[in-house]
Amino acid sequence: MGGIYVIGEVTPDGHLANISTEVATLARTVAAEGGQDVAGIVVAADPGPAAQELARYLPRVLAVTEPAAADRPWAMVAAERIAHILGNDTREFDFVGSGPDGRDLAGALSALTGWGVLGNAVAASWSDGSPVVEMSVFGGKLTTTSRFTTDAGIVTVRPNVVTATPLDAPGTVEPHENAEGLSQPAVRVVERVSEASAAVPIEEAKVIVAGGRGVGSEDGFGLVEELAEALGGVVGATRAAVDSGWIAYSQQIGQTGKIVKPQLYFALGISGAIQHKVGMQTAGTIVAINRDPDAPIAEFADMIVVGDLFEVGKAVLAELRARSG
Amino acid sequence: MRIVVLVKPVPDPASGAERLGPDGRLDRAAAPAVVNGNDEYALEAALKLIEEHGGEVTLVSMAPPNAPDTMRKALAMGAQSGVHVTDPALEGSDTLSTARVLAAALEALEFDLVLAGVDTSDGVAGVVPAGVAALRRLPYLSYAAKIEPDPGAATVRVRRISATGFDVLEAPMPALISCTQALGEPRYPSLKGIMAARSRTIETRALGDLGVDGSGVGGGVATTAVVDSTPPEARGATRVVRDAPDDAARQLVDFLAERRLLKGSN
Ligand SMILES: Cc1cc2nc3c(=O)[nH]c(=O)nc-3n(C[C@H](O)[C@H](O)[C@H](O)COP(=O)(O)OP(=O)(O)OC[C@H]3O[C@@H](n4cnc5c(N)ncnc54)[C@H](O)[C@@H]3O)c2cc1C
Ligand SMILES: Nc1ncnc2c1ncn2[C@@H]1O[C@H](COP(=O)(O)O)[C@@H](O)[C@H]1O
């Protein structure tokens, strides 16, 4: 087959994960530069809905019905299936998101096919017969440009590096039958638990309002939430706030949390320690409220308001509400 | 229970001194090495499990010759022994080689669980654990926030962090689990632990000892290469606002409006 494939990630309710629309948009641009074919592949117990959604972004999508995906973690099942269908290709590049599912898939598919992985792309293009991928490493201190040394490989793409853009007319969906059995051991999903958390995963948020130790308590996060609401964003946090039990680990940003790239990062009571900075310093705009003008965040924020986060935060909230009428 | 923890020595991210060498590979001399942050959470989880169920923890690292210095710190936290895979042929390995070599190293060990970190601060690929699991055909349970083995039934349950909450996964042991910080703060080594670590053994294994053909792994067959690197565009100067709250708030909101960052404008 050859060319570029976008691996559509599927949410537990059978829809296409948001990240896949961005990955498809990026892959389409790369394919156009290289004069390559681009197609999608969706593996799910009922791949129809997600495949239709992916076809809004790609000219052709393979919909692979895989019953095992119903009650097993998606990535390993999809990786094995995709290795069966595409793994014999010697000229092929696969693009997938860089979240947990995308990474699990990339790692397994790499092992099963012998293809390499370029992880966490922040940009990609095509030159000299293969993709060229930019990555931000060492906590954003360096941007590297990498390529594959072979004619096949897997690229994982960070959220928010392109704006998802549908095609003028949707592409076609082709059902794909498969006969081969799966040989990876089964892991069973016993239960899926939804917690009351932000509808938008923090990695995909365009606006993040984050609180640190300075916020002081779970109640204090009420103000952070109100600001997030007023700015149309989601709440983030430092490890200090998470460890204090004020907010869920899913919202933690930094070395051992999420790496984010929103258009706006608004930090309240956050010092900007290196382990936090590595998770957010590529944000478009960084503004901070901190009572300490010498906090490290002052060195890399675009604006810092020196003052008490509650006093200033409430005034900002009032100002935002006044302007939105 | 016998638990293997995959630990990677990485340049200390807090040193701020990480850099690439002229060949585009990590310059390991530039910054002091530490145990990868997420691997400390994996190790802590392993130590808690053997405190509860009994057993032993073995570290496995694929790393340059000086890695035992870093591995000792992990032994001091309480692991009983270590296996250090090192071979000149492994220099410049990519994630695929790493997965292959770690999979081969596991073949020589007996275990109920293998714990790894979800990703590394120097590479942040986050793909090695799934690769090792696929190669070894081990049940793979990833992004763990909670690990509950049932040694009697030889099964393990894991809470996997999901976009909207968590999934409860179950699989037979032996199995491979990738670990997050949600498992709990790593302990500091005690003085007793530090003393004990001095006499614990770290066995060295070359590729030949693992039965791995050196021509199939390492820098010579790396599937990816860094061809260029540049520091990212510098951020502009920081605007410092020291005015009273109402005035400061107006300036902040004006600034966001100028950049079209207010709700509805972005
Ligand atoms: C292996 C490892 C991994 C780590 N991973 C992460 C990670 O993923 N994410 C992460 O965030 N951290 C991580 N850390 C922790 C990191 O080193 C810092 O400890 C943490 O980021 C600090 O959080 P903070 O900024 O909320 O708290 P602090 O550093 O305590 O800063 C609080 C700030 O709030 C300001 N402040 C206090 N009260 C007010 C007020 N009323 N009004 C205005 N300002 C106020 C203070 O001036 C100060 O600057 C990690 C550490 C290690 C060792
Ligand atoms: N060289 C290595 N030696 C031991 N474990 C490793 C090595 N590389 C990766 N790992 C394990 O795999 C996890 C994820 O690594 P990575 O995919 O490289 O980000 C790490 O947290 C380790 O547990």
Image: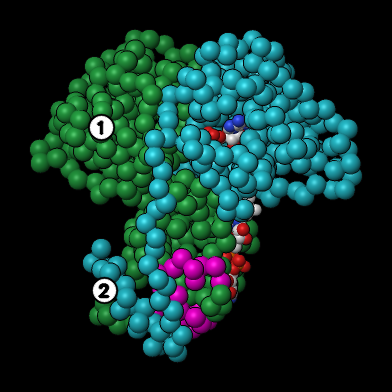
Q: What hue represents chain A?
A: green
Q: Is residue A100 left or right of residue A158?
A: right
Point out the image quarter for the N terminus of chain A. top left
Q: CB of residue at label 1: within 8 Å of ligand 2?
A: no
Residue A322: percent from left, percent from top: 30, 82
Q: Quadrant of residue A70?
A: top left
Q: Is residue A157 left or right of residue B184?
A: left
Residue B172: percent from left, percent from top: 62, 22
For mark 2, what is the residue? B258
Question: Image point 32% across, 15% down: which residue?
Answer: A90
Q: CB of residue at label 2: within 8 Å of ligand 1?
A: no
Q: Is residue A316 above or below residue A298?
A: below
Number of residues whose C-alpha sits closer than 10 Å to that of mark 2, classed few (under 14), some (14–19) or many (20 or more): few
Identify residue type, mark 2: Glu
Q: Quadrant of residue B117?
A: top right
Q: Chain of mark 1?
A: A
Magenta region, residue range = A295-316
Q: What hue represents chain B?
A: cyan
SS type, badge 2 = helix
Number of residues whose C-alpha sits closer than 10 Å to that of mark 1, classed few (under 14), some (14–19) or many (20 or more): few
- What's the CA distance linking mark 1 and mark 2? 37 Å
Question: Image point 76% across, 28% down: which residue?
Answer: B82
For mark 1, what is the residue? A127
Q: Nearer the viewer, residue B79 or B238?
A: B238
Q: How many marks?
A: 2
Q: Chain of mark 2?
A: B
Q: Is residue A305 magenta?
A: yes
Q: Is residue A200 magenta?
A: no
